[in-house]
Amino acid sequence: MAVERKVPSIIDNPMNFCPGCGHGIIIRLICECLEELGQDQNVIFAIGVGCSSNLGGGLVTDRLHCAHGRAGAVATGMKRVNPDNMVITYQGDGDAYSIGIAESFNAAYRNENITVITVNNTNFGMTGGQMSWTTMEGQKTTTSPHGRDCAVTGYPIRFPELVANEFRVAYAARGSVSSPARINALKGYIKNALEAQLNKEGYSIVEVLSPCAVNWGMTPEEAMTHIEEDLTQYFPIGVFQDRRNQE
Amino acid sequence: MKVNVNESRCKECGLCIAHCPKEAIYLRSEVNSKGYRTVVVREDKCIGCGMCYLTCPDGVYQILA
Amino acid sequence: MAEMMKGNIAIAEAAVRAGVRLYAGYPITPSTEIMEYLSGRLPEVGGAFIQAESELAGINMVIGGASCGVRALTASSGPGISLKQEGISILSDEELSAVVINVVRYGNGLGTLYSSQCDYNRETRGGGNGDYRCIVLCPSSIQEAVEQISLAYELAEKYRVVSVLMTEGALGQMMEPVDLPDFVEPKRNPWGFDGKYTYKKIGIFDRDSMKESVLLKEKYAAIKENEQRWESEGVEDADYVFVSYGLPGRSTLGAVRQLRDEGFRVGLIRPITAWPFPEKAFAQINPGVKGIITVEANATGQLVDDAALAIKKNSSANIPAYALTYVYGVPPIKSIKADFKKILNGEIREVY
């Protein structure tokens, strides 16, 4: 009656993420999809700087710890010389959308045949909770101690939408890990994104809303609720561009 | 046995407990060497649905066929 | 059969023949022709050409290619090379081999478009964070440059470092007869990613910096011992030895020969590697030498620091080191000779 569920061998290791962090769920889903597509022994990760950096300790695949923000460019170089490997970037919102916005933007612009996974927890987690470009209005962080004032700092960036509105790419979506249903849907988005790469259809991106219990000052459960009730209002869950639906 | 529990990976985040439909998971009272109270599954209540596997960020659970 | 070729074009073609199969960069004068040539040529040999959105993205694309074991190349100048420093530090840390071409132009900041040697300090010391060094090759002719491209890769791969081919604006733009090297069959370096993680290669997360530092020091010591390259003429009996590289090195050679004809006992050391600095060349200098004189195209004198260190180390007498700094361009022979006379009569004082 029960279906066997086992963590894929390439990620079946202890990792240093905080209790209740979403990273562990996200990377497991990516590795499950790779296994199911027969690509788990054919993958190179371009890992960003931040909480994502913790991945390297537990991931048993080719991977490079890229300079902060540059994974989009590094992955471009990798894929151009190794077109038959799966090349996946794995970055936080700080890495991909602040310091790395140019490289992230341009990889989408060129429709590079890579898959970009961005983990959005609305702050710079690893370094102690500074404001990032996805920090919500009024959210208190260590560099917005009175709450983010968007009139001065700008409004949180919605990157998958930006890509979908400006460029012709293979796939752009946003998911979350805030409930079992969301996790299952997210796995579908990730699978679709990886299939776009496997079938050489172009660039794919999945942003994932992920909890940061420690820097949000919440329990893991409260953090998941915050995503579900608050963050999804501004960062909608869904698919913004899919080559399978193009006229 | 329906589920394998790799207790040493547990970080007491509570997400599995929150989503178990049969309230089959509880925390030990003792802390482990890292300071966490780790999970125990009551086999008599567990139905092998896999919610714990789904929501666990740390690879604690393996659902057996 | 030598043909007349423009410097940048010849270097780009030589890169293709050396097995380069990824170029990523951004246009900047006076290096742009390298990029333009490769945009058409690399796809012809099945290589990848990427016009990157910035020099910063360009070096990171090179990192991606190098991490997969491919001979990857970028070329730039001035502020563009400044943007690449983080990437060069990363390549050094990951022990990935790559070549960066700096077609040096004069000035700080945006600078100018004049040919120059004002990046000597930065290339030989490294402008990125940490204690790493790059092997720096400085050709003085287009022929030398096309031969140094494959040498740059061989050395980079032998030691797993970054090689910098430090040319200069005028070299990139001028034309000379060139014999292009033969084609080298491209092959993947054994540390390159192939998706299979067959053994733990690069991308280290668990560092032991103490252990690594020992290996780092050994590596650089080996390079310094084994890879110094230079040309010298007339140093064994010289009263004064000039030290100059690149195109100024060529006009200095002309000045040395003319001065010899005029009865002055002078010699020249022309570094071919700026790092490792050819200290061994200085051991051959006449022990009674009265001074060494650098000839450089920059404002403040950069080569003179290394030359002074080398001569002071190789002599118990406190040999003075002079610097003739011509700011930009290539100094004419007559200027070098005239300034040499000023050194003799004390009008130009030593730097060290």
Image: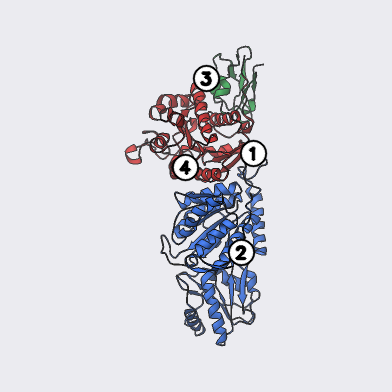
Real-space Cα distance between discs 2 and 3?
63 Å
Which shade is chain B? Answer: green
Helix or strand or loop: what does disc 3 sit on? Answer: helix
Label drawn at residue B18: 3
Residue at label 4? A107
Asked whether residue A55 is in view, the answer is: yes
Residue neighbourhood size for the residue with mark 2, other residues' Cα within 10 Å, grouped as few (<14), some (14–19), many (≥20): many
Nearer-the-camera pick, A57 or C193: C193
Left/right of residue C143 with respect to residue C104 in the rendered view: right
The chain under label 3 reads B
Residue at label 2? C276
Name the mark nearer the viewer: 2 or 3: 2
> x and y percent of residue C88 in the render?
54, 53
Helix or strand or loop: what does disc 2 sit on? Answer: loop
Amino acid type, residue under disc 3 in the picture: Ala
Name the mark nearer the viewer: 2 or 1: 1
The chain under label 2 reads C
Real-space Cα distance between discs 4 and 2?
38 Å
Labels 4 and 2 positioned on one and the same chain: no
* Tag 1 near tag 3, CB within 8 Å: no
Real-space Cα distance between discs 3 and 4?
39 Å
The chain under label 1 reads C
Which shade is chain A? Answer: red
Amino acid type, residue under disc 1 in the picture: Lys
* Image quarter of residue C196: top right
Give me the chain that's blue: C
Residue at 67% across, 63% down: C226
Amino acid type, residue under disc 4 in the picture: Ala
Chain-order first, disc 2 or disc 1: 1
Real-space Cα distance between discs 4 and 1?
24 Å
Name the mark nearer the viewer: 1 or 3: 1
Helix or strand or loop: what does disc 4 sit on? Answer: helix
